[in-house]
Image (cartoon, rainbow, N blue to C red):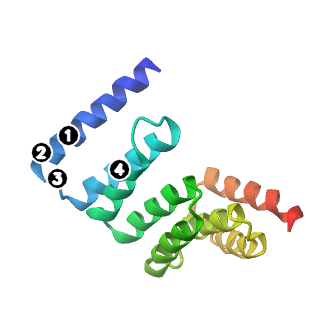
Amino acid sequence: APAALLRVQRVLDHVGQAEAINPRDPELNLVRGFMEWGIASNVGFVSMDRAIQTLQTYAAPNYLSYRGLALAYRDRKQWPQALNAVDQALALAPNNPELLYLKAQILAASGNRSQAKQYFQQAIAKQNQLPRGIREEIQQFSRRIAPQG
């Protein structure tokens, strides 16, 4: 844990240096928004509102900022907002299997298991585009909901 904290501190130092140069840089804000989401989701030192604000304000490319927003809303169990964000991401990157998987997760968590299965199947059909760990995760998640709906 101490080594991880040192690495996090170094990353935050570099982010601070980049912000001093251009606080509105879209890629910087994308990274910062995802970092804030991860910290808010896992540790709670940062407000999820802050992550959402960062991703909404200056982050780009848009399909990734919408993906981050969908993750944040998913973690808050704000299903309509999560679906809206993932749908906006999919409008920009309709063949992205991670986005299809994210939509399936949101649909399953919100109780729409039959529609979720369709998105899981679409994501699995494009699994060759994904790293092995994500492929396995999608398949496990898909199997978990299969008997229930």
Element class at badge 1: helix
User: Where is 35 relative to 80, above or below?
Assistant: above
Element class at badge 4: helix
Asked if disc 2 and disc 1 are in contact, CB closer than 8 Å, the reply is yes
Asked if disc 4 and disc 2 are in contact, CB closer than 8 Å, the reply is no
The residue indicated by pointer 2 is 20
Point 25% across, 61% down: residue = 26
Asked if disc 1 and disc 4 are in contact, CB closer than 8 Å, the reply is no
Categorize mark 3 by other alpha carbons within 10 Å: few (<14), some (14-19), many (20+).
Answer: some
Categorize mark 4 by other alpha carbons within 10 Å: few (<14), some (14-19), many (20+).
Answer: some
User: Where is 68 relative to 37, above or below?
Assistant: below
Marks 4 and 3, how far apart at CA: 15 Å
Q: Which mark is residue 50?
A: 4
User: Where is 90 relative to 68, above or below?
Assistant: below
Whether residue 86 sits left or right of residue 66 in the image: it is: right
In depth, the one of 45 and 17 nearer the eye is 45
Point 56% across, 61% down: residue = 78
Q: Position of residue 134 (x, y in %)?
A: 62, 54
Marks 1 and 4, how far apart at CA: 16 Å
Q: Position of residue 81 (x, y in %)?
A: 51, 68
Categorize mark 2 by other alpha carbons within 10 Å: few (<14), some (14-19), many (20+).
Answer: few
The residue indicated by pointer 3 is 23
The residue indicated by pointer 1 is 16
Image quadrant holding the C terminus, namely: bottom right
Q: Position of residue 39 (x, y in %)?
A: 44, 40
Tell me the kind of residue under disc 3.
Pro
Marks 2 and 1, how far apart at CA: 6 Å
